[in-house]
Amino acid sequence: QVQLVESGGGLVQPGGSLRLSCAASGSILSMNAMGWYRQAPGKQRELVATITSGGSTNYADSVKGRFTISRDNAKNTVYLQINSLKPEDTAAYYCHAYVRVGLEIYGYWGQGTQVTVSS
């Protein structure tokens, strides 16, 4: 079994910054692509950013230039540095990872961490 645990969310004023972390643990042979998604109340979950095992990144247009995704393969951890926060960034942020367990690759979700941007 594999668990993803997010941390780093909170209440921040507009223009502020946060760093989210997502650590994977369990029967992990290797981590493949990892990513961050978010879901605001009443809206569908949307892609924020992804990063491959080789470090290639992809961002939603709404966060380009403000958010940075990175990973530490030795720690099985993915990060999301979020700067210049806006009220519309308020959402529950979820990490997702494709994990090789034995001969198979499975997708896992974390439980989410809340980011609230408000003055």
Image (cartoon, rainbow, N blue to C red):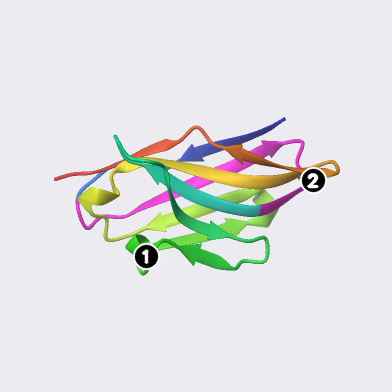
Residue 9 visible, this orientation: no
Magenta stretch: give its range.
14-32
Q: Amino acid at mark 1?
A: Asp
Q: Secondary structure at mark 2?
A: loop
Q: Which residue is mark 1?
A: 61
Give the CA distance from mark 2 to mark 1.
32 Å
| Mark 1 closeness class: few <14, some 14–19, many ≥20 residues within 10 Å | few
Q: Which secondary structure class fits the magenta region best?
A: strand
Nearest to the observer: residue 47 or residue 15: 47
Farthest right residue in view:
103
Q: Quadrant of residue 23?
A: top right
- Whether residue 28 is in magenta: the answer is yes
Q: Which mark is residue 29?
A: 2
Residue 25: image x %, image y %? 67, 37
Q: Is residue 15 left or right of residue 57?
A: left
Residue 47: image x %, image y %? 45, 52
Q: Is residue 12 left or right of residue 19?
A: left
Residue at the (47%, 41%) spot, across then down:
94
